[in-house]
Amino acid sequence: MVPIFNAPTRNLDPVTLHEILRLRQDVFVVEQGAAYDDIDGRDLEPGTVQFWAGRGSVDATVRLLREPDGSERIGRVATARHARGHGLAGRLIEAAIAEARAPRILLGAQEHLEDFYGRFGFVRSGAPYSEDRIPHIPMTLTR
């Protein structure tokens, strides 16, 4: 089984951080054609935790953030093309939910992934919106 890791961004070694950012760039910017500000400063906020899976490389990643209203946010969910279909993203989502301490966890899901996130208890919590020309929906998990 592929191991799962997590650490606050500030505690990551430079190679792991590079691999996480590279994977996010490969999936979001290159593959999905979404030229956006991935390195948005939020990775370095206190309390931000990176989750990743892989053996010798980062094959999947998720970011958990604290929001100003006390909720937490899961985002930057990305899996390398060669690692898809093995359940890595699901295992990382479960790990992030387990790590979260807030009673509300938010995420902005690509609309076609609503059922995927629904498996973890997330429900649609607002109107659809477009982000980088990709249909998204806000989703919330309340515990």
Image (cartoon, rainbow, N blue to C red):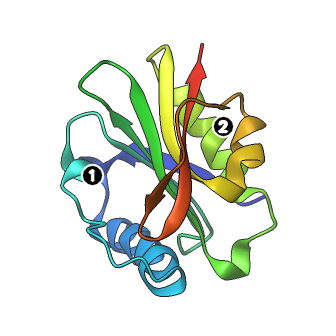
**In screen coordinates, is 119 left or right of 123?**
right
- Location of residue 59 in the rendering, given as x and y in whole percent from the top left corner: 60, 70
Q: Which mark is residue 80?
A: none
Q: How far from the left and from the top, in percent, is residue 107? A: 50, 40
Amino acid on which disc 1 is placed: Asp
Q: Is residue 72 left or right of residue 113?
A: left
Instruction: Please give the count of numbered marks on the rendered protein.
Output: 2
Q: Under tag 2, what secondary structure?
A: helix
Badge 1 is on which residue? Answer: 43
Left/right placement of residue 113 relative to residue 86 reads left
Viewport quadrant of the C terminus: top right
Instruction: Say which residue appears at 52% left-offset and 67% top-offset.
Output: 134
Label at residue 94: 2
Residue depicted at x 25% and y 65%:
39
Q: Residue furthest bottom?
A: 30
Vertical side of 98 occupied by 90: above or below: below
Judge by depth and name the residue closer to the eye, 44 or 113.
Answer: 113
What residue is at 28 percent from the left and 20 percent from the top? 69
Sooner in the amino-acid sequence: mark 1 or mark 2: 1
Q: Quadrant of the N terminus?
A: bottom right
Q: Residue at x 54, y 37 (%)?
A: 96
Give, as a three-letter code, the residue at label 2: Glu
Q: Secondary structure at mark 1?
A: helix
Q: Position of residue 120 (x, y in %)?
A: 72, 33
From the top left corner, tell me how far across and down residue 89 is, in percent.
Answer: 66, 55
